């Protein structure tokens, strides 16, 4: 178990959930937990070392962020966190989970969870049982109602589906931020440079949800400075490769980025990936895509 909990306190207020997307529903749980620090409690997020589905089925759903990004959001809210080995708790009954983990490990005086939270072996416990067990042990139990975005229920599953369908604007609304990633710029074939459109080539982080192949208006963050960009995600059928890459032309930026960590955020889907009959046709389309991203069309 990895802990950042301050032991010198009156107890903890613990946020419960997978927190695999840190979408606006998860943020509502974190914000409510943070409020309980006003009672002298250490506001803490319980995290698992793996997604609970992987611990049960052996396969985790595609990620919506890296672990580093998740921790950054938690700490940005002023919350502590503790990572629990899921294998250590997955076979506990709901009662054992409350008594051995919430009370024994966290000294919980309050817990906060979403309306559909499940816990205990085979997910037998629901929010009603959690409230009952907490009350029996003098723990305040707060349930956050379902969060909607444009009348749609917000969930990590819905966000993954939106990203995979290229509906990045819907995904971003549900996330409350722009979906993206950070990775090192790798060496490319430099064709873009000869065409006047140099690109930052990057591999997608392992396990990340893969957006619909195509071209996106994007934002690139380099050394803390933000630039407009055009990002192509896919296998580049015109060039003839099956390797999936992110290639971003950073508008009005010409410095060498090889080996640097660059943040890419997707803003808007422009068009699907397509194979062009010639490189000249591709270059004309790239020019159009850049103007589109600039707001010229």
Image (cartoon, grey):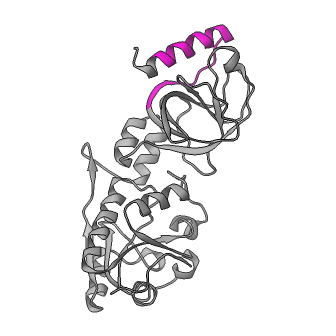
| Left or right of 204 on screen, residue 116 | left
**Is residue 238 visible to the viewer in this orientation of the structure?**
no
| Left or right of 45 on screen, residue 182 | right
Image quarter of residue 130: bottom left
The quadrant of the rendering that contains the C terminus is: top left
272 in the magenta segment = yes
Range shown magenta = 268-291
> Residue shown at 50%/18% (left/top)?
289
Q: Residue 114, relative to residue 103: is it above or below?
A: above
**Is residue 41 visible to the viewer in this orientation of the structure?**
yes
The quadrant of the rendering that contains the N terminus is: bottom right
> Residue shown at 70%/41% (left/top)?
259
Q: At which x and y percent is residue 111?
A: 32, 77
* 166, 216: nearer the viewer: 216
Q: At which x and y percent is residue 195?
A: 66, 14
87 in the magenta segment = no
* 55, 260: nearer the viewer: 260
* 23, 129: nearer the viewer: 23
Q: At which x and y percent is residue 204?
A: 62, 43
Q: At which x and y percent is residue 215?
A: 53, 26
Q: Residue 44, relative to residue 66: is it above or below?
A: below
> Residue shown at 24%/45% (left/top)?
151
| Left or right of 211 on screen, residue 245 | right
* 43, 286: nearer the viewer: 43
| Left or right of 24 on screen, residue 191 | right
Total numbered circles: 0
């Amino acid at each position: 178990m990895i802990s950042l909990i301050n032991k010198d306190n009156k107890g903890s207020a613990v946020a419960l959930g997978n927190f695999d997307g840190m979408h606006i529903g998860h943020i509502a749980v974190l914000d409510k937990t943070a409020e309980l620090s006003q009672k002298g409690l250490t506001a803490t997020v319980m995290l698992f070392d793996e997604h609970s589905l992987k611990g049960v089925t052996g396969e985790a759903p595609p990620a919506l962020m890296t672990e580093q990004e998740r921790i950054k959001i938690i700490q940005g809210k002023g919350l502590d966190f503790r990572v629990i080995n899921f294998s250590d708790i997955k076979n506990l009954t709901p009662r054992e989970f409350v008594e051995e983990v919430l009370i024994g490990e966290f000294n919980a005086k309050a817990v906060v969870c979403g309306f559909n939270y499940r816990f205990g072996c085979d997910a037998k416990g629901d929010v009603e049982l959690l409230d009952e067990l907490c009350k029996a042990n003098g723990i305040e139990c707060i349930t956050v109602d379902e969060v909607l975005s444009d009348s749609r229920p917000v969930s990590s599953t819905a966000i993954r589906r939106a990203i995979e369908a290229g509906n990045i604007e819907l995904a971003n609304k549900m996330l409350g931020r722009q979906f993206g990633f950070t990775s090192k710029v790798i060496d490319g074939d430099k064709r873009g440079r000869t065409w006047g459109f140099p690109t930052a080539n990057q591999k997608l982080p392992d396990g990340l949800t893969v957006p619909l192949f195509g071209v996106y208006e994007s934002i690139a963050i380099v050394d803390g400075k933000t630039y407009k960009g055009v990002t192509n995600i896919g296998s580049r059928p015109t060039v003839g490769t099956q390797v999936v890459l992110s290639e971003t032309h950073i508008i009005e930026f010409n410095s060498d980025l090889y080996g640097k960590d660059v943040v890419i955020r997707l803003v808007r889907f422009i068009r699907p990936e397509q194979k062009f009959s010639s490189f000249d046709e591709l270059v004309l389309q790239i020019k159009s895509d850049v103007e589109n991203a600039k707001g010229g069309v």
